[in-house]
Amino acid sequence: MLLFCFISSVAFAQGRGQAPTTARAAAPVDFTGYWVSVVTEDWRWRMVTPARGDFAGVPLNVEGRKLGEAWDPAKDEAAGEQCKAYGAGGIMRIPGRLHITWEDDNTLRIDTDQGMQTRLFHFNTKAPETGERTWQGYSLANWERPPRGTGTPAPGLGAVRTGTQGRSLEVVTNQLRPGYL
């Protein structure tokens, strides 16, 4: 009996630690290549630059309206801030083409043709404590596995949900310069 306990403890013991999986290896599919956004929602606000004073797509209070109505695009250009609309908050909703590549095994790179911006999604790292604020900020990313049992239902009447291997990309961006929605 004692020998059996010893053998089973060896059999179920934790093995040597393996090198952490890279983000590229953990990706559910290969996202690299050229992509075009399909606009299926909020068409009016994504496809047409609104007229000055048109805030229909943005919930604003009285102070927000005053600030919006006082906006002068010539001042932005004179201050070298013509890229304000292409910050991380806006660039991912603006229709356009994306070129997605891996900069290295743990950094996903997204180049946009609108505003000619580059977003870097950093995996398996921590955000720097301090740093320069930029239009694209510093983005930490991870592949998030959905909870077990939330996959698509199995075929058939009264079927229960089965597990899924799909993953979502979760990105948190900090160190952003102020920009426009």
Image (spheres, grey):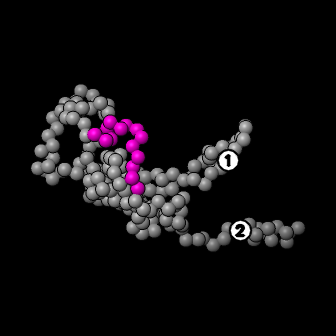
Q: CA distance from mark 2 to mark 1?
A: 30 Å
Q: Residue drawn at (12%, 44%), measured in percent from left and top? A: 74
Q: Residue drawn at (76%, 69%), measured in percent from left and top? A: 11
* Res. 78 mark: none
Q: Residue drawn at (65%, 46%), measured in percent from left and top? A: 149
Image coordinates of residue 119 in percent, x first then y, are 35, 58
Q: Residue drawn at (79%, 68%), measured in percent from left and top? A: 8
Residue of label 2: 13
Range covered by the magenta-colored residues = 35-48
Let me know if residue 135 appears in the view: no
Camera-side residue: 75 or 127?
75
Which quarter of the rendering shows the C terminus?
Answer: top left
- Amino acid, disc 2: Ala
Image coordinates of residue 151 in percent, x first then y, are 62, 46
Q: Nearer the viewer, mark 2 or mark 1?
A: 1
How packed mark 2 is, by other alpha carbons closer than 10 Å (few <14, some 14-19, many 20 or more), is few
Let me know if residue 42 appears in the view: yes
Mark positioned earlier in the residue sequence (2 or 1): 2
SS at badge 1? loop
Q: Quadrant of residue 136?
A: bottom left
Residue of label 1: 162
Image coordinates of residue 76 in percent, x first then y, are 15, 47
Question: Please, is residue 53 above or below residue 20 in the view?
Answer: above
Which quarter of the rendering shows the N terminus?
Answer: bottom right
